Image (cartoon, rainbow, N blue to C red):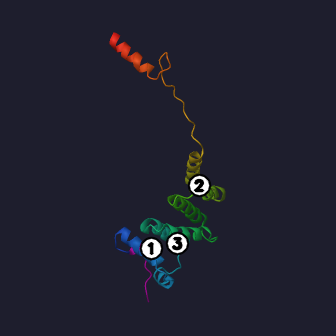
Amino acid sequence: MMRKIDPSDLSLPGAVATGLFCLILQSGFPSLHTRVFGQSATPGMQLQAAIEKENGEGDLKSAMAMYEKIAGDGGAPRDIRAIALLRLAECDEKLGRQAQQIYERIVREYGDQPVVAQARKRLAAIKQQASPQPMSVRKIPTDEFGKMGGLRHRRKTRRLSG
Protein backbone atom coordinates (compact mmCIF):
# COMPACT_ATOMS: atom_id res chain seq x y z
CA MET A 1 0.00 0.00 0.00
CA MET A 2 1.28 3.40 -0.92
CA ARG A 3 1.86 5.92 1.87
CA LYS A 4 0.36 9.40 1.44
CA ILE A 5 3.04 12.05 1.08
CA ASP A 6 2.71 15.54 2.44
CA PRO A 7 4.79 18.21 0.60
CA SER A 8 6.26 19.31 3.93
CA ASP A 9 7.72 15.79 4.39
CA LEU A 10 10.02 16.28 1.44
CA SER A 11 13.62 16.90 2.42
CA LEU A 12 14.24 19.09 -0.62
CA PRO A 13 14.83 22.83 -0.58
CA GLY A 14 11.57 24.79 -0.45
CA ALA A 15 11.63 25.97 -4.06
CA VAL A 16 12.27 22.46 -5.39
CA ALA A 17 9.54 20.94 -3.23
CA THR A 18 7.08 23.62 -4.31
CA GLY A 19 8.05 23.10 -7.93
CA LEU A 20 7.50 19.35 -7.72
CA PHE A 21 4.22 19.89 -5.92
CA CYS A 22 2.99 22.26 -8.63
CA LEU A 23 4.26 19.93 -11.34
CA ILE A 24 2.10 17.14 -9.94
CA LEU A 25 -0.89 19.49 -9.85
CA GLN A 26 -0.34 20.59 -13.45
CA SER A 27 0.69 17.21 -14.80
CA GLY A 28 -2.75 16.23 -15.97
CA PHE A 29 -2.62 13.00 -13.95
CA PRO A 30 -5.42 13.44 -11.43
CA SER A 31 -5.15 9.81 -10.40
CA LEU A 32 -1.48 10.32 -9.50
CA HIS A 33 -2.39 13.39 -7.51
CA THR A 34 -5.15 11.48 -5.72
CA ARG A 35 -2.80 8.59 -4.96
CA VAL A 36 -0.07 10.84 -3.63
CA PHE A 37 -2.17 13.35 -1.71
CA GLY A 38 -5.34 11.37 -1.06
CA GLN A 39 -7.71 14.00 -2.45
CA SER A 40 -8.49 15.93 -5.58
CA ALA A 41 -6.95 19.37 -6.06
CA THR A 42 -8.55 21.89 -3.76
CA PRO A 43 -9.28 25.44 -4.94
CA GLY A 44 -6.29 26.58 -2.86
CA MET A 45 -4.03 24.14 -4.70
CA GLN A 46 -5.49 25.26 -8.03
CA LEU A 47 -4.78 28.88 -7.08
CA GLN A 48 -1.19 28.01 -6.18
CA ALA A 49 -0.78 26.23 -9.50
CA ALA A 50 -2.15 29.27 -11.35
CA ILE A 51 0.25 31.57 -9.49
CA GLU A 52 3.11 29.26 -10.48
CA LYS A 53 1.92 29.40 -14.11
CA GLU A 54 1.88 33.20 -13.93
CA ASN A 55 5.09 33.88 -12.04
CA GLY A 56 7.17 30.76 -12.59
CA GLU A 57 6.45 30.05 -16.23
CA GLY A 58 5.30 33.50 -17.33
CA ASP A 59 2.27 31.97 -19.03
CA LEU A 60 -0.27 34.72 -18.33
CA LYS A 61 -3.00 33.43 -20.62
CA SER A 62 -3.08 29.96 -19.04
CA ALA A 63 -2.92 31.48 -15.57
CA MET A 64 -5.81 33.80 -16.42
CA ALA A 65 -7.93 30.86 -17.57
CA MET A 66 -7.17 29.10 -14.30
CA TYR A 67 -8.02 32.23 -12.27
CA GLU A 68 -11.33 32.58 -14.12
CA LYS A 69 -12.18 28.94 -13.41
CA ILE A 70 -11.44 29.37 -9.69
CA ALA A 71 -13.39 32.65 -9.50
CA GLY A 72 -16.39 30.98 -11.13
CA ASP A 73 -16.32 27.96 -8.80
CA GLY A 74 -19.21 28.51 -6.38
CA GLY A 75 -17.86 25.77 -4.11
CA ALA A 76 -14.49 27.49 -3.62
CA PRO A 77 -13.99 29.57 -0.47
CA ARG A 78 -14.75 33.28 -0.86
CA ASP A 79 -11.23 34.36 -0.02
CA ILE A 80 -9.76 32.07 -2.70
CA ARG A 81 -12.23 33.37 -5.31
CA ALA A 82 -11.44 36.99 -4.36
CA ILE A 83 -7.69 36.38 -4.64
CA ALA A 84 -8.19 34.68 -8.02
CA LEU A 85 -10.09 37.74 -9.28
CA LEU A 86 -7.39 40.08 -8.00
CA ARG A 87 -4.68 38.04 -9.74
CA LEU A 88 -6.80 37.98 -12.90
CA ALA A 89 -7.03 41.78 -12.85
CA GLU A 90 -3.28 42.07 -12.30
CA CYS A 91 -2.66 39.80 -15.30
CA ASP A 92 -4.94 41.99 -17.41
CA GLU A 93 -2.91 45.02 -16.41
CA LYS A 94 0.35 43.22 -17.23
CA LEU A 95 -1.05 42.65 -20.72
CA GLY A 96 -1.91 46.35 -21.02
CA ARG A 97 -5.65 45.84 -20.69
CA GLN A 98 -8.17 47.75 -18.64
CA ALA A 99 -8.97 45.88 -15.41
CA GLN A 100 -11.30 48.43 -13.83
CA GLN A 101 -14.40 46.21 -14.13
CA ILE A 102 -12.72 43.32 -12.34
CA TYR A 103 -11.53 45.56 -9.51
CA GLU A 104 -15.05 47.01 -9.21
CA ARG A 105 -16.46 43.48 -9.05
CA ILE A 106 -14.07 42.59 -6.22
CA VAL A 107 -15.14 45.67 -4.25
CA ARG A 108 -18.82 44.99 -4.94
CA GLU A 109 -18.95 41.22 -4.34
CA TYR A 110 -16.12 40.61 -1.87
CA GLY A 111 -16.25 43.66 0.40
CA ASP A 112 -15.55 41.50 3.45
CA GLN A 113 -12.24 40.15 2.10
CA PRO A 114 -8.77 41.63 2.76
CA VAL A 115 -7.96 41.89 -0.97
CA VAL A 116 -10.56 44.65 -1.32
CA ALA A 117 -8.00 47.18 -0.02
CA GLN A 118 -5.69 46.34 -2.94
CA ALA A 119 -8.57 46.51 -5.42
CA ARG A 120 -9.60 49.95 -4.12
CA LYS A 121 -6.01 51.18 -4.36
CA ARG A 122 -5.75 50.03 -7.98
CA LEU A 123 -9.15 51.59 -8.80
CA ALA A 124 -7.98 54.92 -7.40
CA ALA A 125 -4.80 54.73 -9.49
CA ILE A 126 -6.78 53.89 -12.63
CA LYS A 127 -9.19 56.78 -12.05
CA GLN A 128 -6.31 59.18 -11.40
CA GLN A 129 -4.66 58.16 -14.67
CA ALA A 130 -7.94 58.65 -16.52
CA SER A 131 -8.62 62.15 -15.18
CA PRO A 132 -6.88 64.96 -17.05
CA GLN A 133 -4.12 66.62 -15.08
CA PRO A 134 -4.57 70.38 -14.58
CA MET A 135 -2.22 72.51 -16.60
CA SER A 136 -0.04 75.01 -14.82
CA VAL A 137 0.63 78.47 -16.13
CA ARG A 138 3.98 80.14 -15.62
CA LYS A 139 4.66 83.79 -16.24
CA ILE A 140 7.78 84.42 -18.28
CA PRO A 141 9.63 87.55 -17.18
CA THR A 142 9.87 90.29 -19.78
CA ASP A 143 11.47 93.67 -19.86
CA GLU A 144 9.58 96.96 -20.23
CA PHE A 145 9.40 96.46 -24.01
CA GLY A 146 7.80 93.00 -23.76
CA LYS A 147 10.94 91.13 -24.70
CA MET A 148 11.65 87.87 -22.93
CA GLY A 149 14.62 87.74 -20.61
CA GLY A 150 13.95 91.03 -18.85
CA LEU A 151 14.75 89.44 -15.52
CA ARG A 152 18.09 88.21 -16.81
CA HIS A 153 18.88 91.72 -18.04
CA ARG A 154 18.10 93.19 -14.62
CA ARG A 155 20.25 90.61 -12.90
CA LYS A 156 23.21 91.46 -15.10
CA THR A 157 22.66 95.14 -14.40
CA ARG A 158 22.65 94.55 -10.66
CA ARG A 159 25.84 92.53 -10.78
CA LEU A 160 27.62 95.14 -12.84
CA SER A 161 26.50 98.03 -10.68
CA GLY A 162 27.11 96.21 -7.37
For the N terminus, give its image quadrant: bottom left
Badge 3 density bin: few <14, some 14–19, many ≥20, Cα 10 Å: many
The residue at the far top in this view is: 161
Location of residue 110 with respect to 74 vertically, above or below: above
Regarding mark 1 in the picture, which secondary structure is present there? helix
Q: Mark 2 points at which residue?
A: 116
Regarding mark 3 in the picture, which secondary structure is present there? helix
Label pair 2/3, CB-CB below 8 angstroms? no
Q: Does the magenta stretch include residue 7?
A: yes
In 3D space, how far apart are the residues under numbered discs 2 and 3 (Cα atoms)?
Answer: 21 Å
Identify the amino acid type marked 3: Gln
Regarding mark 2 in the picture, which secondary structure is present there? helix
Location of residue 124 with respect to 54 vertically, above or below: above
- Residue 34 position in % (x across, y down): 50, 82
For the C terminus, give its image quadrant: top left
Segment tinted magenta in the rendering: 1-9
Q: Name the residue under label 1.
A: 22
**Left of 131 or right of it: where is 53?**
left
Identify the amino acid type marked 2: Val
Q: Name the residue under label 3.
A: 46
